[in-house]
Image: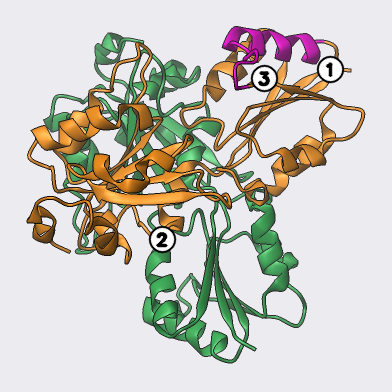
Chain colours: A green, B orange
Amino acid sequence: MSGKLTLVGAGPGDPELISVKGVKALADADVVLYDALVHPELLDYIKRSAKKINVGKRAGKHSYQQDEINALIVHHASQGLHVVRLKGGDPFIFARGQEELEYAVSYGIDTEAILGISSIGLPGYYGIPLTRRGINESFWVITATTRNGCLSGDIALAAQSTATAVIFMGLKKLQEITDIYTYYGKAATPLAIISKGSLPDSRIIFGTAESISRAPALAQIEAPAIIIIGDVVATNPDFYEAVRNVISQPQYQQIQL
Amino acid sequence: MSGKLTLVGAGPGDPELISVKGVKALADADVVLYDALVHPELLDYIKRSAKKINVGKRAGKHSYQQDEINALIVHHASQGLHVVRLKGGDPFIFARGQEELEYAVSYGIDTEAILGISSIGLPGYYGIPLTRRGINESFWVITATTRNGCLSGDIALAAQSTATAVIFMGLKKLQEITDIYTYYGKAATPLAIISKGSLPDSRIIFGTAESISRAPALAQIEAPAIIIIGDVVATNPDFYEAVRNVISQPQYQQIQL
């Protein structure tokens, strides 16, 4: 009996957004390693005899390092077990899925991957199209937090383009990000932050690059959150009402829709 | 009884990549309007009494215009029926989902949207991470075919950045796209094309911006296809073997990994 690793994307939060194929893999698994942000209802698909390991424990408890996760995968799959690695969102979009697969392959373990719904779909769900005919034709997806902890230089390039910027893991660097837009003369660019998208306690706040730091609801925004910056944000019907209280300059009226 | 519109993303091709929530919506629908690229097995989830309308017929047959689709949605939902609009990929990523929702809302129809797995997940599935630590931190998603039929100017900006470019609907404009990369001194940039991703008859071909037009398998590549351009493409273990026959210049050896 040979073991196997299946990487499964759990989707953005709502447990019903996992794929049919992902559910089948969970039901077949002998061992499931899951992230902190995976919805607990998804664990109900796992058979009773299977081992469930939370590798992303939070709130001060032990959180597994990537090399420990890799070792756990190889340890169990080498015993002939079917290991499912359940990750939030999509396993390949800012999620190191490739690295986990390659590590398992290097030990001769069979691997499979099941795609998940990335948070990239969330802006549309909350009424912000990433592209809109007549406004723009592309969007740029960037992780704010890079290997060395610095802000990605790509954000400065995005600020100079017409692409909608979709920024992952940027909440703690919000001020730095908006400063870049202001520096490039884009202080009035519409901006939205979606927190816990697709879940019942999701929140969305609006502002401009210049004004978002004064949005009253910013204090209630929690991770995971994505930041969307671009003129398409202003096509949301709630945008103007939401920004009325935080805009200090009349710049936003110049935005052409 | 009031009608309703539910927009459902069918995923990239494999019928098992639809979400659990999407399956439930299909099972509840009274009318389903589906695209040409939706897998026929997904129609098995629809109850027998429901009406199934292929609004994307191909091969010379009548294909519905967007305003006809909008009218069909309103016509059926106004009779108190649950209309499901089943779209390939994700309903909001280059798919006009927002426009269909807004049209229905303007007629007072209740709407819901269920996200789907976009083709953006496919590169990772085929061994091409869109970002990789040490190589790059972002990817830029562009539709090649714009409103006026011209190539998006954003492709020229992407060619000058370090972002991986993911180009939708670009197969017919491949030469124009690669010419832009060559113009900006990026002729040696690794490039891949994934056709019919996640389906059994999927194909992936590799080259560089300069050489892809000579790839022997290019003639067998069919829509839907996505084009991926960037140094991350060369991290795929099959890349160098695949490009050996089509590279005319030793430029590709200069790619730093």
Is residue B108 visible to us here?
A: no
Bounds of the magenta span? B58-78
Residue visible at 72% across and 11% down? B72
Q: Nearer the viewer, mark 1 or mark 3?
A: 3
Q: Chain letter of disc 2?
A: A
Q: Which mark is residue A95?
A: 2
Residue placed under numbered mark 1 in the picture = B2
Dot 3: what SS? loop
Dot 2: what SS? loop
Residue B75 belongs to the span the image colors magenta: yes
Of B106 and B57, nearer the camera is B57
Residue placed under numbered mark 3 in the picture = B55
Q: Where B44 falls versus B99 (above or below)?
A: below
Residue type at mark 2 is: Ala
Q: Nearer the viewer, mark 1 or mark 2?
A: 2
Q: Where A46 falls versus A121 (above or below)?
A: below
Residue A49 horizontal/vertical position (percent) = 75, 83
